[in-house]
Image: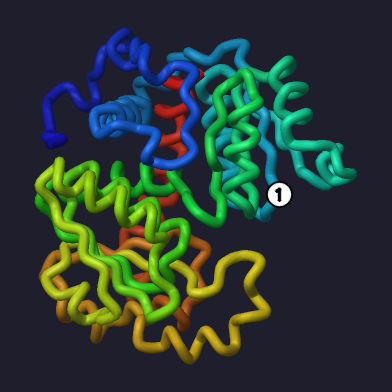
Amino acid sequence: MLAKTTSDKGLLEVEFLQIPDLKGKDVLTLNDLTASQIKHIIRGALYLKNKKSRGIKPLKGKVLGMIFNKPSTRTRVSFEVAMWQLGGYGIFLNTNDLQIKRGEPIKDTARVLSGYVDGIVIRTHDHKEVEELAHYAEVPVINGLTNLAHPCQILADLLTIYEVKGKLAGLKLAYVGDGNNVANSLLLGCSKMGINIWVSSPKGHEVDDEILSLAQKAALENESQVVVTNDAAEAVKGADVVYTDVWVSMGEEEEKKGILEVFKAYQVNSQLLKLAADDVVVMHCLPAHRGEEITDEVIEGKGSIVFQQAENRLHAQKALLAMVL
């Protein structure tokens, strides 16, 4: 259990940086991190979010290569700013400008970049590409988003929930919508942190079976619940946190017309939130399609912590980068 302590924002620099089991580690999914490591990343993020920590430059002289095969606002900007604030430098590498676009194998790109940079973040469609890159790279690889997982987003989400609720273990989080990369990663993150997670998706749009199995195992170890249902109301009932994401992921826009009809019962709106706890908070990893998966009233409402959540991408990734690099 991650409990609040007086040292959260006064964490000693030496304690924050000396995490030998994280140095040089690939982070492709949250299954690559233990519960203890996730807790330490959250504590490190709290420390780095404090403006008094701005003078700390643990990554001075370090360079992060950032391969992007998909559009990005939060991931790109947060990683670039994180490296700069930590004393390092981030190089944005659009795949259209790399030889990958002309057919160079990922394994060759991995070995070439390993001679130039100290770590690689990659945002792409196929998770297998990230696995191949990590296999051949001689520097740590961090998944900035794939079709299967979005681990950095959930590290920021857990940080945000902890800031708002003062704890993680014992809470109930309801995810409503497509069983996509965010839902998959929430399953792993919540189950490792002792959060009871309910995932509600339409039939045919459920979470990945293998990740669900891993989450169920982690839940047993951490005395939490993992429940998958097709009933949004059942999932949201009594929830402390309600989370949603777009119904149509990047690259699948041509399927939108049919999907809107399938998902209309899964919109996070004021009526659905009446079933949740009185002090429920609402999360969305953004970008949001207002009027589809979430209403404008809810995302702008008093329970919305969406933009605090977005800011925390920076702080969580600063902690992760400092520990891994």
Asked if residue 198 lies left or right of residue 116, the reply is left
The answer to whether any part of residue 139 appears in the image is: yes
Residue for badge 1: 69
Residue occupying the point 43% across, 48% down: 153
Q: Is residue 209 or residue 227 the one in the foreground?
A: 209
Residue at the top extreme of this rendering = 14
Where residue 92 appears, x then y in whole percent? Answer: 71, 36
Q: Between 209 and 146, which is closer to the camera in this rendering?
A: 209
Q: What residue type is labelled 1?
A: Asn
Q: In this orientation, which residue lies closer to the viewer: 2 or 99? A: 99
Q: Position of residue 190 (x, y in %)?
A: 25, 49
Give the residue at the far bottom of this rendering.
Answer: 261
**Residue at x-position 39% and y-position 64%:** 207
310 horizontally vs 231: left or right: right
| Image quadrant in which you'd find residue 12 | top left
Residue 63 on image: x %, y %: 64, 20
